[in-house]
Image (cartoon, rainbow, N blue to C red):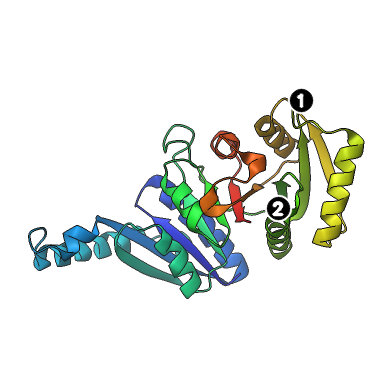
Amino acid sequence: MKTIIVPVDFSQQSEYALKAAASLAKKHGAEIIVLHMLELNYAMISSSEAYHPEQIVFLLKAAEKRLEEFLDQSYLEGVKVTPVIKHYKVFSEVNDIAEKHEADLIIMGSHGTDGLEEIFFGSNAEKVVRTSDIPVLVLKKDRPNFAISTFVFACDFREDSIPAFQKARAFADKMGAAFKAVYINTPGDHFLSSSDMNDQISKFLDRAKAGMQVDHYCDYSVERGVLNYAEAMHADLIGIPTHGRKGISHFFMGSIGEDIANHSGVPVMTFKI
């Protein structure tokens, strides 16, 4: 891991993300790109009837000063930190910056269950997830000594989830974490017999060229199954696949991906299919 992007808005949750990034950066010798987006829109910058140039300069200088103060933290000692300020909020720019710096990971803080329109829908984190080509780690608790020993990855084990599965497994290997893949079997239309489940998973693993065991976990809903399985495994991280701009993968349609992220005390990482 060489580069981590951390978007910040100076909130406590931003600091949680920065602490986790610092912990990973120290362990893997990575650089942190700290990104702040001003609350200016394009009209403010381009219109002569809006802000005068000196006002724009003042706002940029104020943001630079505040970001400098925000980054004056003892836990960042020994870590290479590069601050970047963008004039206005265009969340696709996070992915552009990630590509420019060849970043491996984006880490974002969340306000939790009720704070941000439930993370995946209508939130800043959701917008970054949908435009990011690299994994996005979302956490809502302070984890200053963030480490990943056990990584639980849940998906439907259909062919279009193979890229996300491979990225997640590679990330676990990079972190030196145990990788626990799980299929959540639920009552209703999506219920599979043991035979059908084993057949679907076996075909998936063959196509993914992955020789490993996949656990089956039965519960009343996918959300409860993922969270209960992760708790049973003492997971440090939960991984789920996403379709990027198309939203959560069909296994996590509706509010399932959102609910997992918001109701989980464990950090959640998304992998684009």
The residue at the point 46 percent across, 56 percent down is 18
The answer to whether residue 257 is above or below residue 147 is: above
Kind of residue at badge 1:
Pro
Where's residue 58, x and y in %? 15, 64
What residue is pinned by disc 1? 187
Residue 92: x and y in percent read 42, 60
Describe the element under mark 1 as helix, strand or loop: loop
Q: Residue at x 46, y 44 (%)?
A: 110
* Residue 4 falls left or right of residue 198: left
Q: Indicate whether 76 appears above or below 121.
A: below
Residue density around tag 1, few if under 14, some if 14–19, many if 20 or more, within 10 Å: few
The quadrant of the image that shows the N terminus is bottom right
Q: Quadrant of the C terminus?
A: bottom right
Kind of residue sitting beneath label 2: Ser
Q: Is residue 174 left or right of residue 14?
A: right
Mark 2 lies on residue: 161
Residue 40's place in the image compared with 189, above or below, is: below
Task: Please report whichever mark, 1 or 2, sits nearer to the chain's N-terminal start.
Answer: 2
